[in-house]
């Protein structure tokens, strides 16, 4: 008989952890996650975990209570260490949003590779496995010497679009840059839609300019797909270009909604009809333009499959994956554009 897994959580996304536990018909484990008076993280596991299969749910992002990204990383490391020292059999770090992922390589001299350093720290703390969602760069999996399950939010996002009747010839799936084409192709295949790519250049760090679009967007609803939204500058400028060259509406989809700086204000004033993200990062500000979808079912199903030694990749084999209580995941033309003003991203 397989022993039910235990689920623990830090403070960065407690609501998601509770939803995962609810869908697994269990509860979040009893643990103290607090601060000492000198602001050091205080962790205490308050139930027996000896010999147990344990999953720690913690996005490495800012928490709704105001804790920083670094606080979230430290909480995760200390919880994993505490569980290993309490004789847990296997500890899996479930990291819906993997922070520091953008720093996955050196772009100039004397820079750190922060994503690799975070991977090293997780392994040193004692993590036996990593479960994450839509890594910014797939090669980050290679930074680990332990198993990594890089899940996809595509089934959840595509099912939302299908419910809104946004599929087929009426839409065009748009990649905001050349690097996102494989992701956009996945969406285009699931939605049976055409594909377009926005070509841009970066004259300086965190600034982008749209130069031209590859693909036909005339008279169609543009669905721009990305892995994360930070300040939103790139997507706002992309929407302006898409509208200028014939797109009737613009929807933006992303797995991780960081919404740094004045991103919310930019979207509310932009040409974008709606922004759809998942709850890998907790919602802190509401906006009528932003829709949050739950990713809990995919993570709950992955945890159940890992516990029972079943394939995780089977969750994403079907093009019509539908989230539910089962083990399935949750329900060329080139157009030259005139010069476009630089956008902060």
Image (tube, rainbow, N blue to C red):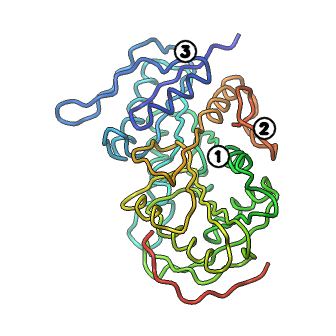
**Circle 3: is it few (<14), some (14-19), or many (20+) Cα within 10 Å?**
few
Report whether 106 appears left or right of 151: left
Nearer-N-terminus badge (1/3): 3
Quadrant location of the C terminus? Answer: bottom left
Which disc is residue 51 wearing? Answer: 3
**Figure quadrant of the N terminus:** top right
Q: Is residue 185 left or right of residue 7?
A: right
- Residue at point 37%, 45% (across, down): 62
Q: Give the number of the mark in front: 1 or 2.
A: 1
Residue 150, compared with residue 234, is above or below; it is above
Q: Earlier in the sequence, mark 1 or mark 2?
A: 1
Q: Which mark is residue 314?
A: 2
Residue sitting at x 56%, y 51%:
143
Residue at the image point whose x is 78% and y is 38% from the top: 314
As measured in the structure, the alpha-carbon distance from the residue carrying label 1 to the one carrying label 2 is 14 Å
Instruction: Verify CB contact (< 8 Å) between mark 1 and mark 2.
Output: no
Position of 269 relative to 48 (above/below):
below
CA gap, disc 2 to disc 3? 28 Å
Q: Residue at x 69, y 59 (%)?
A: 183
From the image, tell me which residue sits under label 1.
153
Mark closer to the observer (2, 3): 2
């Amino acid at each position: 008989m397989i022993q039910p897994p235990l689920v623990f959580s830090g403070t960065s996304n407690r609501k998601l952890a509770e939803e995962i536990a609810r869908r697994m018909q269990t509860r979040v484990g009893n643990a103290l996650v607090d601060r000492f008076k000198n602001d050091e993280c205080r962790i205490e596991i308050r139930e027996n975990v000896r010999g147990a299969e344990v999953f720690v749910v913690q996005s490495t992002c800012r928490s709704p209570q105001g804790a920083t990204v670094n606080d979230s990383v430290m909480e995760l490391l200390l919880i994993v260490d505490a569980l290993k020292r309490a004789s847990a059999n296997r500890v899996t770090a479930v990291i819906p949003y993997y922070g520091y992922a953008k720093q996955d390589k050196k772009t100039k001299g004397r820079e750190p590779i922060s994503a690799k350093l975070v991977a090293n720290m997780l392994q040193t703390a004692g993590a036996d496995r990593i479960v994450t969602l839509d890594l910014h760069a797939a090669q980050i999996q290679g930074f680990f010497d332990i198993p990594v399950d890089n899940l996809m939010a595509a089934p959840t996002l595509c099912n939302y679009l299908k419910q809104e009747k946004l599929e087929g010839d009426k839409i065009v799936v748009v990649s905001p840059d050349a690097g996102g084409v494989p992701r956009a192709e996945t969406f285009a295949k699931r939605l049976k839609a055409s594909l377009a790519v926005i070509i841009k250049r970066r004259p300086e760090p965190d600034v982008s300019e749209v130069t031209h679009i590859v693909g036909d967007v005339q008279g169609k609803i543009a669905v721009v797909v990305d892995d994360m939204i930070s300040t939103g500058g790139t997507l706002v400028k992309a929407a302006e270009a898409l509208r200028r060259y014939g797109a009737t509406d613009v929807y933006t989809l992303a797995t991780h909604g960081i919404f740094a700086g004045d991103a919310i204000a930019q979207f509310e004033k932009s040409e974008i009809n709606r922004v759809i993200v998942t709850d890998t990062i907790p919602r802190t500000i509401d906006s009528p333009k932003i829709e949050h979808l739950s990713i809990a079912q995919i993570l709950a199903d992955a945890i159940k499959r890992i516990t029972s030694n079943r394939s995780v990749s089977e969750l994403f084999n079907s093009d019509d994956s539908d989230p539910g209580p089962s083990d399935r995941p949750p329900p060329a033309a080139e157009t030259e554009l005139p010069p476009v003003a630089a956008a902060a991203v």
